[in-house]
Structure formats: structure tokens, C-alpha cells
Image (cartoon, helix red, strand yellow):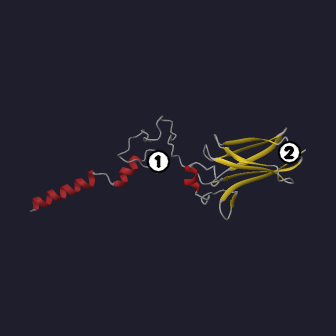
């Protein structure tokens, strides 16, 4: 019995002295001294493989990239000769439609509306106002999910921002009774 006790005590002593504690393992793995540790399963120096990073440049190449619900929309309109040029920048994805309306402030017979398609964060449109009378012209631009009866936003835009734009966030969100939008209004003087 003494012999069995002695063997058991020796095994416990070897286990206590010979094995590293979990804390000692973490300290040994903390090579940089910054408190972060690597696990024994990690391949030191190897990068994780992202299946969407097909070309290895560190960027995700997935068509399902996440779209931010915080909309940034800058719009500027200027009279250039006999035209109004609307230009703008946004963080909205390509093929998103930006609605516009140009109206004469005194003669409502002069009215133009349409959509501009976003490409690489930019949208632009040129509107001929050569035959319009002099006076103030109102230029309205807007990102909204509901555009009209014949024109619709791409399906991915509707999915992210909601049928009525209920998910649109940002500094210039206009909350309407039917839809939410991000708008810009400018007044130009045609001489």
C-alpha cells in the first residue's frame, strides 16, 4: 500500500512540476508583450482565407457587400448657358436612382422631372432650359425608394432601405407620411 501511495504521489509531483499552467502557456504565446495571445491552433504568420477575396488583395469581392443605411447625398445645380447641370456625390451603390425635378417658380407650365443613375458614387444630369422664361428655377433632388409608377429602385436597394424608405438614416432624412427620403433643394436665377 505504501508503494502504491508513493507511486501516486510521484505522478502528482511530476504533473505539478513538469506541466505548464494555462497562464504560463498564454505568457509564452504573448510574444509581443501586448497582452494578445495566439492559440496553438493558429498558423503563425498565415492569413485567414476569405472566400470572397478571390484575388488576395484583402478586399471582399462579393456582390453581396453590405450597404450602409446611413445615406450621404450631396447635390449641386448650376446654370451653364442654356442648361441646368445637376451633379452630385453619394455613398449609395451603383445603379441607385436619384430623382430630380426642375420647376419654374412663377410659371408652373415649365416643369421637368426624371431620374439619375449613380455610377462610382457620382450622378449627373443636364436639362435644357433654353425655352424657359427668365426667373427663379427650383431644383429638387432626392433619394427615395418609391419613384413612380413606371420606374423602380433596384431590388437590393428596396431590401436594404425598406419599401417606403423606413430604414434610411442620415443627417438630412425627411420623414414623410408615406415615404422617407434624403432631399436637396436649390434655387437658381435664370437671366
Identify which residue is drawn at 38% across, 44% down: 42
Q: Nearer the viewer, residue 148 or 182?
A: 148
Disc marking residue 132 = 2
Q: Is residue 34 above or below residue 56?
A: below
Residue 22 % position (x, y): 34, 54
* N-term-proximal mark, 1 vs 2: 1
Quadrant of the rendering where the N terminus is positioned: bottom left
Q: Nearer the viewer, residue 86 or 13?
A: 86
Residue 169 % position (x, y): 63, 57
| Left or right of 127 on screen, residue 163 | left
Q: Is residue 175 above or below residue 158?
A: below
Secondary-structure class at tag 1:
loop
Is residue 169 visible to the viewer in this orientation of the structure? yes
| Left or right of 56 on screen, residue 100 | right
Counting other residues with Cα less than 10 Å from the Cα at mark 2, is it few (<14), some (14-19), or many (20 or more)? some
As drawn, which residue projects farthest toward the top?
Answer: 55
Identify which residue is drawn at 76% across, 46% down: 76
Is residue 67 visible to the viewer in this orientation of the structure? no
Secondary-structure class at tag 2:
loop
Quadrant of the rendering where the C terminus is positioned: top right
Disc marking residue 102 = none
Counting other residues with Cα less than 10 Å from the Cα at mark 1, is it few (<14), some (14-19), or many (20 or more)? few
As drawn, which residue projects farthest toward the bottom?
Answer: 177
Disc marking residue 33 = 1
Identify which residue is drawn at 39% across, 51% down: 26
Q: Is residue 28 above or below residue 8?
A: above
Residue 137 % position (x, y): 83, 50
| Left or right of 169 on screen, residue 101 | right
Q: Nearer the viewer, residue 88 or 30?
A: 88
Amino acid at each position: 500500500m505504501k508503494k502504491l501511495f508513493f507511486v501516486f504521489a510521484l505522478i502528482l509531483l511530476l504533473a505539478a512540476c513538469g506541466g505548464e499552467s494555462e497562464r504560463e502557456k498564454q505568457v509564452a504565446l504573448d510574444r509581443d508583450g501586448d497582452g494578445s495571445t495566439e492559440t496553438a491552433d493558429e498558423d503563425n504568420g498565415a492569413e485567414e482565407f476569405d472566400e470572397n477575396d478571390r484575388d488576395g488583395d484583402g478586399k471582399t469581392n462579393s456582390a453581396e457587400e453590405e450597404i450602409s443605411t446611413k445615406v450621404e447625398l450631396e447635390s449641386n445645380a448650376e446654370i451653364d448657358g442654356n442648361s441646368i447641370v445637376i451633379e452630385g456625390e453619394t455613398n449609395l451603390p451603383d445603379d441607385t436612382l436619384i430623382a430630380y425635378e426642375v420647376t419654374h417658380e412663377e410659371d408652373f407650365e415649365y416643369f421637368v422631372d426624371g431620374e439619375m443613375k449613380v455610377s462610382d458614387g457620382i450622378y449627373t444630369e443636364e436639362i435644357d432650359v433654353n425655352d424657359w422664361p427668365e426667373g427663379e428655377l427650383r431644383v429638387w433632388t432626392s433619394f427615395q425608394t418609391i419613384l413612380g409608377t413606371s420606374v423602380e429602385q433596384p431590388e437590393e436597394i428596396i431590401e436594404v432601405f425598406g419599401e417606403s424608405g423606413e430604414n434610411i438614416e442620415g443627417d438630412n432624412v425627411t420623414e414623410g407620411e408615406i415615404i422617407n427620403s434624403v432631399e436637396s433643394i436649390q434655387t437658381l436665377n435664370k437671366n
